[in-house]
Amino acid sequence: MSGYRLTSGGNVDRQRPVRFAFDGRPCTGLAGDTLASALLAEGIRLVGRSFKYHRPRGVLGIAAEEPNALVSLRGGGRHEPNIQATMAELHDGLEVRSQNAWPSLGFDALAVNGLAGPLFGAGFYYKTFMGPTRRAWMWFEPFIRRAAGLGPPPRQADPDVYDRNNLFCDVLVVGGGPAGLAAARAAAECGARVALCDERAAFGGSLRGAAREIGDVPAQDWIDAQLAFLAGRGAVLLPRTGVFGYYDGETLGAVERVADHLPAPSSGQPRQRYWTIRTAEVVLATGAVERPVLFAGNDRPGVMLADSVRQYAETYGVACGRSVTVLANNDSGHAAARSLAAAGVTVARIFDQRPEVGPAIRAIAVGIGADLRTGWTVVATHGGKGLHAVTAAPADGSGRAERFETDCLAMAGGWTPAIALASQRGSAPVWSDALGAPLAGVPAPGARWRVAGAAAGRLDTAGCLAEGAAAGHAAARAAGFDAAPSAPPACAAEPVGLHPAPVPRHPDGKAFVDFQNDVKCADVALALREGYVSVEHLKRYTTLGMATDQGRTANVNAIALMAAATGRSPGEVGTTRFRAPAAPVALGALAGRHTGAHFQAVRRTPVQDWHVRHGGVLSPVGPWLRPRAYLREGETIRTAYIREAANVRGAVGLCDVSTLGKIAVEGPDAAVFLDRVYSNAMQSLAVGRARYGLMLRDDGMVLDDGTAWRLSETSFLVTTTTTGAGAVMTHLERLHALFWPGLRVALTSVTSQWAGMSLAGPRSREVLAAALPGTEVGNGVLPFMGLLEARMDGAPVLVARLSFSGERAYEVFCGADHGEAVWERLLQAGRPHGIMPYGTEALGTLRIEKGHVAGGELDGRVSPFNLGLEGLLSRKKAFFGSALLERPGLHAADRYELVGLVSTAGVPLRAGSHLAEGPRTRPGPSQGFVSSTTFSPATGQEIALALVKGGRARIGQDMFAADPVHGAHHPVRLAPPCFVDPEGARMRG
Amino acid sequence: MRIPCPTCGPRDLREFTYIGDALRSAPALEADADTWAAYVYTRRNPRGEHLEYWQHSHGCRQFLRVRRDTATHVIHAAACVGPHATEDEA
């Protein structure tokens, strides 16, 4: 046992014990604890195993900088891996599991990775598995993945709700420590709408529970007073809210952990809330992170950051050890020692790497009865799964090393301002020699942030309060709220953590610089020897700073190591740029409510309910749900679609085509406009007639196919494919706006306004006639490609004699509200003729039998010359896309050409298969690919459409449809793409 | 990023669709293949101020010519183009 609960102090409720379990072991903490403070109070130091070497690791820090203490929380669908114990709040019944240890945390078999340390150095994977030995990767990968890693992902669906919210404010203050609170108060006093976020559970930052006075009140009282004032001014206060991204236009992303501190969210309460914050001005009061000191064994459980040890005592009433040793290279370690002693923690000795310290600092050690040794450093640590002693020696190597018993080593290695958000917004960091760390540079043009407090390098509380208030005032003024805020309160001076000379030596042994990614000082040196002298290269080669903690404790030490090793100044070494997210964001928070049925908005056709009532099996097509087939008793999709398709060829069928895109093109120049956008002539289209047409992109490739119906001299109805509707609308609008703004034409999407159904089959005319009694529907008034306006039981309908199936067919359009009535009327009229509804599978079968192209062929990579649609290219006019159709590559003899395929072995083919000339053992290069497949009831064969190199000249040739992914290699014969009625007599008749 | 739509006011980036480079002018349909190839495939990629077309696809559906700094993402001006063109303010 090492850490323990102090008898007093801390912002914890000693009357409210909280029970939780760590690896099954029952533990007790207090309300107000983080998981880390509760574990430390229970004396638990070994919390996890490290990423690569499986070294024992414990809690290092206090908040989001924690690299070591990653745990998995809860179970089932609420299981969440890789949570920092320092950020997780305790709740009753919390189940905690350690990670990356097998079979147990105490005995980890994979810790042999640590013995093989030299093997796993920087660049190990590249060197071992790339190049000639690349194949070995295939063999070793599963083992390496299991041996090196984080917690396992959850296996069950998350039962909780995640929300998205927007927040608008004048001044956003990120960070609720002394500087942030002072900034928020000043901005609110000026009248600005203020929002204040802090990633920790409560505001106050390092002041929480601190035994000091602000103005003339205790620190905690001052914090509470500021929060009460802000609440009174209507400020939005968001604790548990980490800002992870700072984007253009002062848009910031944040995640609020709404219910992570509860056993389960209450009914309707989201677990987390993703905030999109739009603000006029930003104050970044994100604080600073203390750095570890580099020496062998600095990762042993019990070795911690000094100010974190101080905060565990003051904020949570927890002593991290029975006898604490401080190792400092600056004054702040002494301040921490003084506070620890005042809180009742024993500080036995202080090592300060500096040869000499001032009298005020020396007086601290004297005052608390600690043995101060200046010019000394720690060179080794001892203890298996937790520290029990250190070896220290004079830092200049002049004297003999000595061993000291201690169970907690508090490292004060200097302070790194948290500047990730400023960097994300485009500010190049500027190295500060005084601080030994980079500071945020000047804001990029247009950026509206200012930085205050420790994030700006001010490490004393008085300075944080003054600068925070000034920044809040400046932000409010910039947002248009100018008033004089009250003066910030005074507070006593304190020793601050300026790092005088950051020259880490190259320590021997396992001195870690990046704890989470297990990067040692020696790895940095190795990367340099191998030529990775840029800090960006170093990061990628060693993975330093790339872990979930984003190297908060590691980056500056790495820069200092590089500088020392290359004889450059740290400023010359530079820093890597920070990118969003600054902290891990749960996928659930990103998804918000867009999960399950809400993943995508579903568009419903007017007939959808009928489909469901009648056995239609719905499947997504673009944003729609369409019936694949209507299952009867004992049928499968396959037997159903074969029945439905055969019935269209033999009698008559009805298909819901309401999903087709529909665009009204109206105006005096509508015909001229369509003549330019379609490859075939449209101006010559007579009123009351329809025409099939092809639209090309700028580069001559096929955009979409569809039909144009001329309703009057100045009015057309254009149909598109279901999935191409949006792209065609944008295309037409773009051409109008950017190419021919002078044309008098209006474009309106009317897809939802019309219901559409295709009545197809040799008996279709009889059915239509029966549904439209008294209306002549013969070939004289309604020939192939003719249009007819009529009324069906009073509902206005528009009938077009169009055929996708190759049969005599009519597309009946009506207002969406009449859709189901017209559908049922046609079915009723068709009953004597054996009508059946048919779904998208039969629709596909019928068009494949006819060799009509659809989504499988129109994949954006085909020109009209690939599809055999040269006949639709007008020779009399220029049209959109025509210029680039002249490119020789599009006319190459070996271009892909649309052909049909017959499966000569009679087995079903699979779209995506490649066409090969040779058998399975030596297939040869791909000759093309299968684009659409079906069983053809009309021919009794398994057929397909395919795009084959020089395909038309190869019709009759035998090949193989190769699908090695599924182990298929089936013989096929190339055929003309049209399998049924190539002359078109059936659809015209 | 927010784009000041002349008809709808300043709106979030998510409402807009990037359409393309507005430094090039649309060729005539009758122009030769070289002209069209230059239009389709050749474009400047300036760092700094750039003219781009955006469509307010989840709004008024107007096409805007937007003067944007590609280095800072600062938007200096936006005007409608096409049949409902507006004056460029800046």
Image (cartoon, coloured by chain):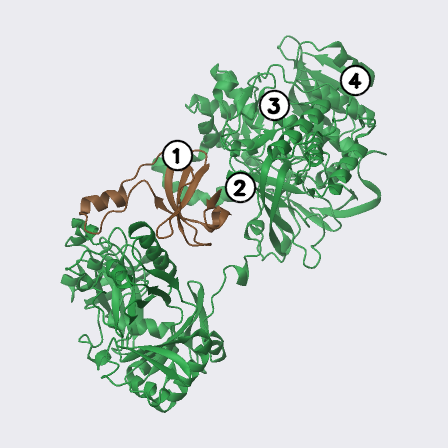
Chain colours: A green, B brown
Quarter of the image containing the N terminus of chain A?
A: top right
Badge 4 element: loop
The disc at residue A296 is 3
Q: Residue at x 61, y 42 (%)?
A: A101
* Number of the front mark, 3 or 4: 4
In this figure, which residue is indicated by the disc labeled 1? B49
- What residue occupies the far top of the structure in this picture? A398
The reply to whether dot 1 and dot 3 touch (C-beta < 8 Å) is no
Marks 2 and 4: CB-CB under 8 Å? Answer: no
Query: Which amino acid type corresponds to the residue marked 4 in the rendered image?
Result: Ala
Residue A835 vertical position relative to residue A6 in the rendered view, above or below: below
Q: Residues within 10 Å of mark 4 (few under 14, many from 20)?
A: many
Q: Of the residues tagged 2 and 4, which is closer to the observer?
A: 4
Q: Residue most toward the bottom?
A: A832
Q: CA distance from mark 2 to mark 4?
A: 43 Å
Q: CA distance from mark 3 to mark 4?
A: 24 Å
- Circle 3 residues within 10 Å: few <14, some 14–19, many ≥20: some
Q: Position of residue A828 (x, y in %)?
A: 41, 88
Q: Residue A370's mark?
A: 4
